[in-house]
Amino acid sequence: MKTNLKMLMLYFSAVTAMFLIAVSGCDDSTTDPPLYGNNPNVLTFDSIGVEEDSAAFQSYTGINLLTGTTTIDTSGSRDCSLQDRTNGGFDFYLQNGQLLDNLIAGGFEIRFFRVSSDMNVTTYDTLSKVPGYVTFVPQDFTDDNTASGGVWGYFNAPLSTTPVYCFWLKGKKDAGVTPKNVYGILQPREATDRSPNEVYGYRMSFRVRINTNGENDFRKQILLEQ
């Protein structure tokens, strides 16, 4: 009889435990998983190509970084232009578009500083902000080109490193094209040269992200309010 009583008590204990587990599993206090969406202030351009071609004043050497588009070298909308150090077809860099033959007004100006001398693609893609900075001030942007007089190095084909630069579209803000400062990060993607060490034939592309709200924030997605 005692054995049967123990078995009966064990049975009721098991049933009670299962009931409690079932009840706790239906608890309405569980929260929904976080919901993410595209960052409305950040635009991403995966591949902006520029090239040194033989068509004078019609080469697509310029970049409008606000729209992520390639422009001809005489376009007034360009922020920067592809240049080579000695006009010899090697040692390329991006130069302030304002300085190319002084063809556009001083209001169209870009400023750079270097974030990293070499960064892998995964790190660049997940870069949420430029490290070491809360906000940007004009003094942070130390140069008008990506070579800084050779100190930061030049681009050649194939690329030996993939540095990252932070830029400020100073001219577009000064000219009233944008209501706020636009900041961005830029990294060379690839480079080829049909005629190495000769004029013309060089081509390269860049991956770019910009923040149109004047912030050091380059997250592609942000947590949405629920």
Image: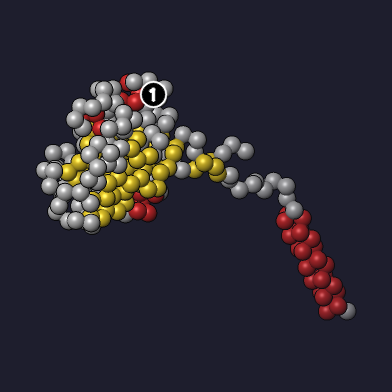
The residue at 17%/38% (across/down) is 148
Quadrant the N terminus occupies: bottom right
**Quadrant location of residue 70?**
top left
Residue 138 or residue 18, whichever sits in front: 138
Quadrant the C terminus occupies: top right
The residue at 79%/60% (across/down) is 19
**Quadrant location of residue 102?**
top left
Q: Is residue 173 visible?
A: yes
**Which residue is situated farthest in the front direction here?**
55
Q: Position of residue 107 (x, y in %)?
A: 28, 22
Q: Amino acid at mark 1?
A: Val
Q: Position of residue 2 (x, y in %)?
A: 85, 77
Left or right of residue 12: residue 79: left
How many numbered markers are drawn? 1
Specify the color scheme.
secondary structure
Left or right of residue 182: residue 109: left
Q: Position of residue 209 (x, y in %)?
A: 39, 41
Answer above or below: position of 6 versus 125: below
The residue wearing badge 1 is: 177
Residue 214 or residue 19, whichever sits in front: 214
The residue at 17%/43% (across/down) is 84
The residue at 69%/46% (across/down) is 29
Q: Position of residue 73 (x, y in %)?
A: 27, 36
Answer above or below: position of 15 versus 190: below
Mark 1 nearby-residue class (10 Å; few <14, some 14–19, many ≥20): few
Left or right of residue 151: residue 29: right
Q: Is residue 166 visible?
A: no
**Which residue is situated farthest in the right direction here?**
1
SS under mark 1: loop
